[in-house]
Amino acid sequence: MTERKVTAPDLLTMKERGEKITVLTAYDYPTARLVERAGIDVALVGDSLGNVVLGYENTLPVTMEEMLHHVKAVARGVERALVVADMPYLSYQISVEQALENAGRFLKEGGAESVKLEGGLEMAETVRRIVEVGIPVMGHVGYTPQSVHAFGRRVVRGKDEYSARRAMDGAKALQEAGAFAIVLEAMPAALAKEVTASLVVPTIGIGAGPHCDGQVLVIHDILGLGEGAPPKFVKQYARLGETAVEAIRQYAGEVKSGAYPDEEHSY
């Protein structure tokens, strides 16, 4: 029997009782099933699919239609986990009306149960309006990947007083606007601890140390499915990419030699 469905208000309850929240990205039906079977609380359909699934250099090219395609697949694959759809670049920044329409599409067409968008103080009113129409919103402050060109190589946010204050004020503004949780990305652990303690709603850390109320990582990173070294904050729990390449090499070798298919694998 499937456990009770996780909802946005459940995350606040988890924070109140000191239970850590597990979040992992999922991009299609197979990864959604893995997340579901492992008992993860939140399946985030991140616009990071641009990097890890679609082969883009960053998240900026990802479109609403691409996101909807993947959100639908993930929604079909989960039963218990809360499905959060990442709103892609320029799907919510142009106007509040645009943000409302696109957030609604993720629930109405995509089957998501909430949305996530990047930005703090500057996005508070947009978050407020989306929440007012009944759509749960997860916020995101600190390093925001959609601002990659503005940040340049300075990934970690909050090392200086100005960016630390922006992160704190942004998180508080998002909470006031009605966000049910806030992602804290790439900031010093001490700052993330301070932000977490100052909020009623839970924080979800990624590269923000151990003091957040939950953690999120990219599923391809923890499974070792990517190429190259992962970011400092990523712990790889498996190296399935290497295993897959070796299996494919064995398959290719057996096809070349005629060893496959043999009698056992023929009708």
Image (cartoon, rainbow, N blue to C red):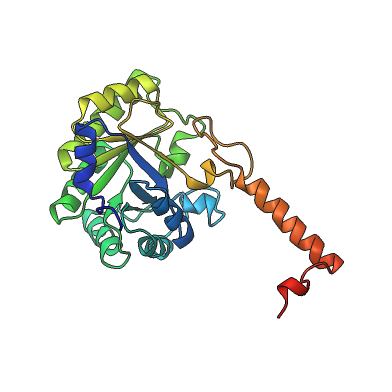
150 horizontally vs 21: left or right: right
Identified at 25% across, 35% down, the residue is 202
Instruction: Tell me: residue 129, above or below residue 182.
Output: below
**In the image, farthest residue toward the right:** 257
70 horizontally vs 203: left or right: right
Q: In front: 218, or 134?
A: 218
Instruction: Tell me: residue 1, above or below residue 177.
Output: below
| Quadrant of the rendering where the C terminus is positioned | bottom right
**In the image, farthest residue toward the left:** 132
Identified at 28% across, 64% down, the residue is 105
Identified at 25% across, 33% down, the residue is 171
Q: In front: 73, or 250?
A: 250
Q: Position of residue 5 (x, y in %)?
A: 25, 54
Instruction: Tell me: residue 69, above or below residue 160.
Output: below
235 horizontally vs 168: left or right: right
To which quarter of the image does residue 1 belong?
A: bottom left
Q: Position of residue 15 (x, y in %)?
A: 23, 34
Identified at 72% across, 72% down, the residue is 265
Q: Position of residue 230 (x, y in %)?
A: 57, 37
**In the image, farthest residue toward the bottom:** 267
Q: In front: 145, or 2?
A: 2
